[in-house]
Image: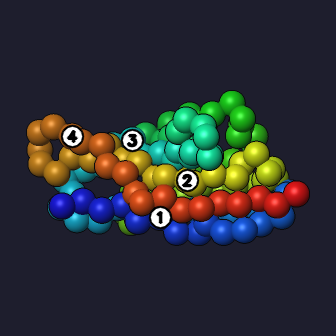
Amino acid sequence: QVQLVESGGGLVQAGGSLRLSCVASGSIFSINTMGWYRQAPGKQRELVAAITSIGNTNYGDSVKGRFTISRDNTKNTVYLQMNSLKPEDTAVYYCAASISTTRYGKSDYWGQGTQVTVSS
């Protein structure tokens, strides 16, 4: 069993910052790409940022220059530093990871989500 547990969401004023964390635990052989997605009410889930096991990153256009993704492979943890937050960043943020539980194959896992609300 593999679990992803997010933390760090909350309510912040526009222009403020938040840092999300996501820890992967369980029967893990290796972790490949880790990332953050978000879903606002009435909208589709979208990629916020992703990071490979060697640190290559990819960002959604709407967060480039404001958000930074990083990971600590020794702690099986991925972070999302969110700066200059806007009301349109309000959403449930989900952690996702591609994880191998054995030497062969991999599966995608999701966290339960954490609410981020940005007030104007």
Report helix, strand or loop for mark 3: strand
Tag 3 residue = 33
In this rendering, which labeled residue sits more in front, label 4 or label 2?
A: 2
Does residue 108 lie above or below 83 as drawn?
above
Q: Is residue 32 left or right of residue 42?
A: left
Q: Is residue 45 left or right of residue 23?
A: right
- Quarter of the figure that contains the C terminus: bottom right
Give the colouring mode of the picture: rainbow
- Quarter of the figure that contains the N terminus: bottom left
Identify the residue shown where x is 81% and y is 50%: 86
Tag 1 residue = 6
Tag 2 residue = 93
* Residue 53 in sight here: no
Q: How far is disc 2 from disc 1 in space, using C-alphas?
A: 9 Å
Tag 4: amino acid = Lys
Q: How far is disc 3 from disc 2 in space, using C-alphas?
A: 17 Å
Along the polypeptide, which appears first: circle 3 or circle 4? 3
Picture coordinates of residue 30, whole percent (x, y): 25, 50
In this rendering, which labeled residue sits more in front, label 1 or label 3?
A: 1
Does residue 65 lie above or below 16 as drawn?
above
Tag 2: amino acid = Tyr
Q: How far is disc 4 from disc 1 in space, using C-alphas?
A: 21 Å
Along the polypeptide, which appears first: circle 3 or circle 2? 3
Does residue 112 lie above or below 8 as drawn?
above
Q: Mark 3 and 2 residues: CB-CB less than 8 Å, in contact?
A: no
Asked where in the image residue 42 lies, by quadrant, the reply is top right
Tag 4 residue = 106
